[in-house]
Image: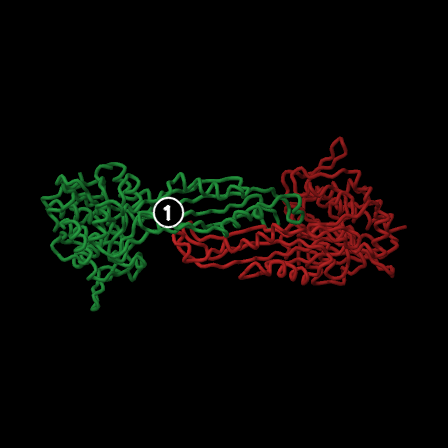
Chain colours: A red, B green
Amino acid sequence: MDRTPAHTAATTAPAGAAPLDLTLDAAALTAALVDFPSPSGEEKALADAIETALRALPHLTVDRFGNNVVARTHLGHAERVVLAGHIDTVPIAGNVPSRLDEDGMLWGCGTCDMKAGVAVQLRIAQTVTEPNRDLTFVFYDNEEVAAHLNGLGKVAEAHPDWLAGDFAVLLEPTDSQVEGGCQGTLRVFLKTKGERAHSARAWMGSNAIHAATPILEKLSAYEPRKPVVDGLQYHEGLNAVRIEGGVATNVIPDECTVVVNFRYAPDRTPEEAEAFVREYFADCGIDEFIVDDHSPAARPGLTHPVAAAFMASVGGEARPKFGWTDVARFSAFGVPAVNYSPGNPILAHKVDERVRASEIPEAEARLRAWLTD
Amino acid sequence: MDRTPAHTAATTAPAGAAPLDLTLDAAALTAALVDFPSPSGEEKALADAIETALRALPHLTVDRFGNNVVARTHLGHAERVVLAGHIDTVPIAGNVPSRLDEDGMLWGCGTCDMKAGVAVQLRIAQTVTEPNRDLTFVFYDNEEVAAHLNGLGKVAEAHPDWLAGDFAVLLEPTDSQVEGGCQGTLRVFLKTKGERAHSARAWMGSNAIHAATPILEKLSAYEPRKPVVDGLQYHEGLNAVRIEGGVATNVIPDECTVVVNFRYAPDRTPEEAEAFVREYFADCGIDEFIVDDHSPAARPGLTHPVAAAFMASVGGEARPKFGWTDVARFSAFGVPAVNYSPGNPILAHKVDERVRASEIPEAEARLRAWLTD
């Protein structure tokens, strides 16, 4: 129904943008992707270009759902590996087009998060025509915005079979180190109640802020657990991220809310994590315990043979991932996943975002070695 | 300069309102005052009427400043007593004109707070032409609104000599019981600081909400002092009235503020009160201590002979006043003061505000006895 030519559909796409040339080296392809702006919500033109480029490769079948593109081999291998990456970026901030400086640093919006990774995916798709394991390439939209818009989540819901596999690599920036799994995150509201009174006659009421003292005491006394899961050491955390209470400056407050964020290692199920928090604050006189948000952890799955082969190929030492990432979406339907890609994650979303150009073909080469050995 | 006829100057004044008739009995005069609406900011017509009525009394000199009227005897007595009351009310809420029910209850806006008291003042001014102590009557505006608008404060600043005296009675509703002095109120902000970090890597930062734990512990452990001052037992209070901290639900907060209200007995000076609070929280790791607001306490002064005579005349037992009231304005320039008037203070500002009509002439009679014995 859409009659708009693909390359002019997104307002931010450069006029007359050339089709993607997957024969470029990975650094040059990264630059081409950066010069093809695709902030969240404006990924259509880039998704079109990726789809077109992949459909030209006879060893792949290509599916599309919205602005999400999935390409797969069907070689009948016993194992299947998923390489996934989001194609959107945060808003452009005067940092497009890309620029390669004399020190070999490639600057521009998305260089690091994560068009370098997308370039590596596309290069593997282009060059590894006879992989030693079946391959699935996932390019998805809306990762940088609200979770309910996330393209990977939408594909998982509509076409879970497209994402099936034994192991997944998300090409999010990790400084070319393997970051395995991710910790879960649970947010709860702990409310204490009291009774209002004029603060000149405080003894007529009951102070809900004072009633929150045991909660803060337990938070202050918390000793983080640091379990080793699939060979990686995680580091849990239990923190107040917000506190509020008070009616007026002359009123004894009748309610206080402590918002607590529990970051937990992937050896806990969501149910166990919630039970831990309930138990930990059980004696604190909490009047209301509300689960506000909960995203489960993901195991790194590094004990699987395909993951062990991956580690052997890319080298280095796997690190645990503390923050929640999209690997948990794979984990949720049984595919262990890690993050791995060039680029310093600290530079993501910054105006001076950049990546060392030479890192990109190096990462490509390591992945190729794993998939062709 | 103002050529507007007095009785039509305020938009809420009844058209053709009769001059105040001070020969009415105190309950009827209260009803007449209620039927002369004077919400804060619209007191001019009533101030005009009071001034006119008082100027007709040859034993008094009358001064006016804004909508504040001060009338005094000059009999050369060794002692001077001040009777003070505000003439404004909270906004009318369909509860004017006044209504006397068959049980002898007088209903209407200001019946209780505090036109019954103003009626008593006016009746004493009318009837006690040869008092045993010199008398000062103060009628002031804007008590029910922001403190900086308060008419008593404005007179104190512009004409402090008009308010001089040995003892003052504010005719605020107290159920016809003497309420002596008032407690001071100090509000401080106690701030703790930390360092932001992503809540997935909490150990990279420092949690300012957790750092507030010792403050809440001290608040929870606080045991109020209940000193006897001039024969009245006060009851101090130290309470958090607000707490806030938090940046975002995935960020370790770098600041937390606990707003603490200290209500203190009139045996402490403001300096002593502040020193107490600083000392009490000295070991709590507070990064900023900010005094936000401070209104000193007022001693009841019941040990003064004129006050003792007052107590003997009105009877009952004096009670301490816990909340801050305008008596502290008198105390601030050396005039001990109490509250005393008919009417249940709980009914002040309510739509169903009322006062038992018979209480009003009873209070008048007791004050007259004290001032003529």
Q: Determine the residue located farthest toward the bottom in the rendered image.
A: B102
Give the image location of residue A265, x and y in percent. Answer: 71, 55
Q: Is residue A369 above or below residue A270?
A: above
- On the picture, is B50 further left or further right than A105? left
| Residue at position x 21%, y 56% in the image | B34
Instruction: Kindly identify the amino acid type of the residue bearing the numbered disc 1.
Output: Ala
Q: Determine the residue located farthest toward the top in the rendered image.
A: A102
**Where is residue B328, by image quadrant?**
top left
Q: Is residue B174 above or below residue A20?
A: below
Q: Determine the residue located farthest toward the right in the rendered image.
A: A373
Give the image location of residue A58, x and y in percent. Answer: 84, 55
**Which residue bears the numbered disc 1?**
B265
- On the picture, is B172 further left or further right than B207? left
Using the rendered image of the protein, determine whether residue A5 is visible from the camera's viewpoint.
no
Q: Chain of mark 1?
A: B
Give the image location of residue B85, x and y in percent. Answer: 24, 49
Give the image location of residue A99, x and y in percent. Answer: 71, 35
Give the quarter of the figure containing the N terminus of chain A: bottom right
How many neighbours does mark 1 have within 10 angstroms: few (below 14), some (14-19), or many (20 or more)? many
Q: How many marks?
A: 1
**Where is residue A190, by image quadrant?**
bottom right
Q: Looking at this view, is B57 or B304 the one in front?
A: B304
Label 1's element?
Answer: loop
Q: Determine the residue located farthest toward the left in the rendered image.
A: B58
Using the rendered image of the protein, determine whether residue B285 is visible from the camera's viewpoint.
yes
